[in-house]
Amino acid sequence: MVEGEKLVGLLSVADLVHAIAQLRVKDEIKPTYISQTFALWEETPLPLVARIMEISGFDAIPILDAESKLQGIISERDLIRHSSIEDMVEVSDFSNGTDDDEWTWESIRDMHTISYGISKIQLPDKPVKTAMVSNVISVPLNAEVSECALKMKRGRVDQLPVVNGDKKLVAMLFDRDLIRAMCRAPDNKNL
């Protein structure tokens, strides 16, 4: 936030979610606020989970069991916590090209050897269920907007799985979805 030409503070997404929690918005999340998502099976190997996150652009993915019930959620932070860094030294030899013509028997070449370090992040080949957060904070489809914002604030999370009565995943609710929907709501007198 800027007053005049002086920076007086920063407004974060968490600050906006906190404000939504205090507004006591009674709207249900189901029609407007939720995002479509996908999920992974609890036996999916961690290296594949990381690649799927990279391709999809999601930084958190719900995890389901064989009966399609929500078992947990995996985030980039969880992957980093379970990764290891593998350091190695690579050696490369190269020359400046040919120092003579092709008909000469003897030649002198300028050979160069370069050694350089490489660090790779490695994930163990274990199922995602070994790294996921299993104590997931989730909400039902009929949850109220402010209730969800309060759960995000208290749980210090930026997404909540939305489940039906059978604990089956229906969608995901992201903090940015709450903010976007609140900004679009023309009849919302709380803003």
Image: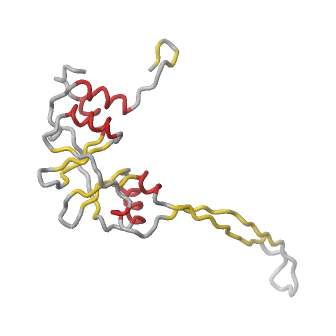
- Specify whether residue 183 is in view: no
Please, is residue 61 above or below residue 120 in the view? above
Task: Measuring from the top left, give residue 112's x and y in whole percent.
Answer: 79, 69
What is the quadrant of residue 41 in the picture? bottom left
Q: Is residue 151 left or right of residue 67?
A: right
Q: Is residue 156 left or right of residue 105?
A: left
What is the quadrant of residue 29 in the picture? top left
Please, is residue 126 above or below residue 60 in the view? below
Quadrant location, the C terminus? top left
- Specify whether residue 156 is in view: yes
Closer to the camera, 112 or 20? Answer: 20
Q: Residue at x 27, y 34 (%)?
A: 149
What is the quadrant of residue 176 in the picture? top left
Task: Measuring from the top left, give residue 178's x and y in whole percent.
Answer: 26, 35
Please identify the residue farthest to the top as the structure is shown: 4
Quadrant location, the N terminus? top left
The image's colouring method is secondary structure
Q: Residue at x 45, y 67 (%)?
A: 124
Q: Is residue 25 left or right of residue 4?
A: left
Q: Residue at x 23, y 29 (%)?
A: 184
Closer to the camera, 114 or 59? Answer: 59
Total numbered labels placed on residues in the image: 0
Q: Residue at x 26, y 52 (%)?
A: 37
Please, is residue 139 above or below residue 105 in the view? above
Task: Measuring from the top left, give residue 64's x and y in whole percent.
Answer: 24, 60
Closer to the camera, 138 or 189? Answer: 138
Task: Measuring from the top left, give residue 111's x and y in whole percent.
Answer: 81, 72
